Image (spheres, helix red, strand yellow):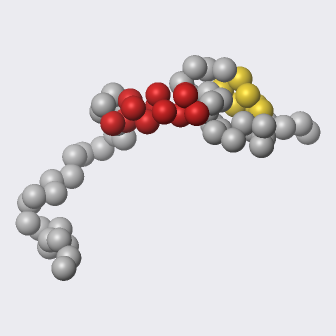
Amino acid sequence: MGVPKVRCPTCQRELAWSDEFPFRPFCSERCKMVDLGAWFAEERKVPGEAADLMSGEEGSEPRD
């Protein structure tokens, strides 16, 4: 059984899941940073209901 192959989530380049690619699952630091920028720009989201951080519900108050 060989080394598993994956596709870079950003550019779709196929790469081996090995120490040869230290930024895995990304093929490079550039692809990793492009993906991070997309999260910051809210182009990517985790599905689910938005959390209401200002609702005042129990457990949502800031700690001292």
The residue that appears at 63% across and 39% down in the rendered structure is: 23
Work out which quarter of the rendered image holds the N terminus and state it: top right
Q: Taking 37 as reference, is 50 left or right? A: left
Question: What is the x, y in percent for residue 3?
Answer: 84, 37
Q: Kindly indicate the quadrant of the structure image that contains residue 53.
A: bottom left
- With 64 as the anchor, is 8 left or right in this view? right
Q: Residue furthest bottom?
A: 64
Residue at image point 30% right, 44% down: 48
Which residue occupies 57% across, 20% down?
11
Q: Residue at x 72, y 36 (%)?
A: 21
In the picture, which quadrant includes the C terminus?
bottom left
Residue 48 versus residue 27 in the image, above or below: below
Left or right of 37 on screen, residue 14? right
Q: Position of residue 35 (x, y in %)?
A: 46, 31
* Residue 57 coordinates in the image, percent (x, y): 11, 68
Q: Is residue 44 left or right of residue 32?
A: left
Residue 31, by quadrant, is top right
Residue 43 horizontal/vertical position (percent): 33, 28
